[in-house]
Image (cartoon, grey):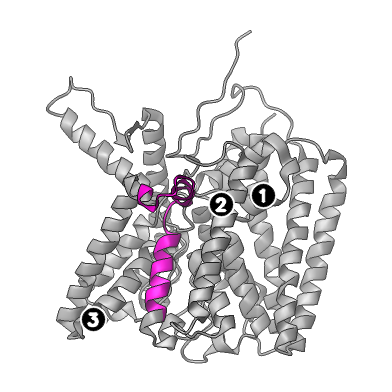
Amino acid sequence: MKSYSRKKHSRYEPSLTFSQPPHIYELMNYHIISRLLGVLLIVLSGAMSTSIFFSELFNERDTTYALLNAVFITLTAGGILFFIGRRYAHATISRREALVVVSLSWILIGVFGALPYLYDGVFFRYGLFHNYTDAFFETISGFTTTGSTVLDPVLTTEIEKLSHGLHYWRSLTHWLGGMGIIVLFIAIFPQLGVGAKHLFRSEVPGPITEGLKPKIKETSTVLWRIYVGLTLIEFLILISPVCDMGWFDALCHSFATMATGGFSTKNGSVADFNSVSIDLVITLFMFLAGVNFSLYYVALTRRSPLAIFKDTEFRTYLGIVVAATVLVALNIWEFRHENLFQAFRHAAFQVTAMITTTGFGTDDFDLYPTFSKLLLVCLMFIGGSAGSTAGGIKVSRIIVLIKAAHYEIYKTFRPQRVISVKINNSTIPDDIIRSIFGFFVIAITTFVGGSLFMTLFDYDLATATTAVAATLFNIGPGLSQVGATMNFAFIPPIGKLFLSFCMILGRLEFYTLLVLIVPDFWRR
């Protein structure tokens, strides 16, 4: 009998291979899917309940009632789903089931995570979220670490009208989504067993396994420890006399920074603090959040921070940030006649915010010269490192694409010579290169198609294209009507739902979600 083995999983691209031949399928175990989704909602309700502490601390009883209602409904729904799959407590999950669980998880956290906004806005407070679509959009934007908002930060100053309890929940959605709710799920529940690796690989953006623990549960725990540690360090620096930021603002901004999210407690984002030290600290931690987290583990285990610089992707990422900062700084210095230090201060912040897809702002980059705006848009597409919390195409994929293109050019005049594409002295297999090209084609096709869809609402080209880019690559602000000082409130409900889909699609890096529309996926 012919045997079928799994293909080796590369660190450069997640694999979508089958554990058995394509014409043989196991029945989809909907009970275990129900059980896992139930546990996920129970965990979500627990995370949601922590917001009650802040609403009570600041005497916001309306928000407390809203949160209690949201927690109760989420917990009840989770309990029902868990009860349906209770007999499958020790069953392992297959690759197909993992893809379904991960995709449905991101939809469900949007559906139930929106309830605090909905209850607080519709029933108790000022109607900041006018309908469920707005609340859903804000929630998905939070969990996918996009940072786009329907709240108006300028004309009605809605962001600062939000209660402390909801500000905390808004920032917490960033922080939980940054490293990944499924990764946290695996770290908390080791009994998932061998099925955990399917969940892990279906959600984690980009390849991050090199140098980490061989077991997925241990890998998840290591990643979360590093994530928590960096968040805590940033928080302590922000509340120190060096920055002198209030503890609540520091907590929310630390969550948003390490998640590369971008939600702020201030109408003017980080610019409202008007502090050089705060700008520098947040710039540094945005940069760190855009680094492959497995490199931190390698540096810690080898007790050599310089080990990070041996990584090709890190050196390229650092080079892009430095070069773009210099170019933008000189450009805005020349055309806006700013002080050179201020030009570099704003340029470093905005370049780092764009390439890491954080989306914080210390300046309205929509007013920058055309060259700087175009360069920042290019950085949106590039994104951070694979294995970081940043969005975008990822630096490692850009490196492979450029090297592969160079190889094809070389073949036109030296067809007999065999040249392999390498990163960190590791040869990239041809099938991985093809999958990266496939990823790039899907990303660009989705961007173009989405931009065409948004032009149906008669928006200008800059608004339509950057709204899709900002959501598809989990950036936050775009240009023109969705610029740094604007919002997405004016977009009709169908447009917000489409952009919410773009956020999830980009967060799961296309394949995990799109595979569900392949008819073969559902056949027995």
Residue 306 falls within the magenta-colored stretch: yes
| Badge 1: residue crowd in 10 Å (few <14, some 14–19, many ≥20) | many
> Relative to residue 107, is residue 301 drawn left or right?
left
Indicate the position of residue 477 as horizontal and vertical percent values: 42, 72
Residue 58 can be seen in this image: yes
Number of numbered discs visible in the structure rendering: 3
The Cα atoms of the two marked residues, 1 and 3, are separated by 44 Å
User: At label 3, which amino acid type do we have?
Assistant: Phe
Image mark for residue 187: 1
Name the quadrant containing residue 164: bottom right
In the image, residue 20 above or below residue 64? above
**Given contact means CB atoms under 8 Å apart, are the residues at marks 1 and 3 in contact?**
no
Residue located 65% across and 63% down the image: 110
Q: Which residues are magenta?
A: 278-307
Q: Quadrant of the N terminus?
A: top right
| Badge 2: residue crowd in 10 Å (few <14, some 14–19, many ≥20) | many
**Given contact means CB atoms under 8 Å apart, are the residues at marks 2 and 1 in contact?**
yes
User: At label 2, which amino acid type do we have?
Assistant: Leu
Name the quadrant containing residue 280: bottom left
Which residue is more in the foreground, 296 or 204? Answer: 296
Q: Which residue is mark 2?
A: 223
User: At label 1, which amino acid type do we have?
Assistant: Ala
Q: Which residue is mark 3?
A: 341
Mark 1 lies on a secondary structure that is: helix
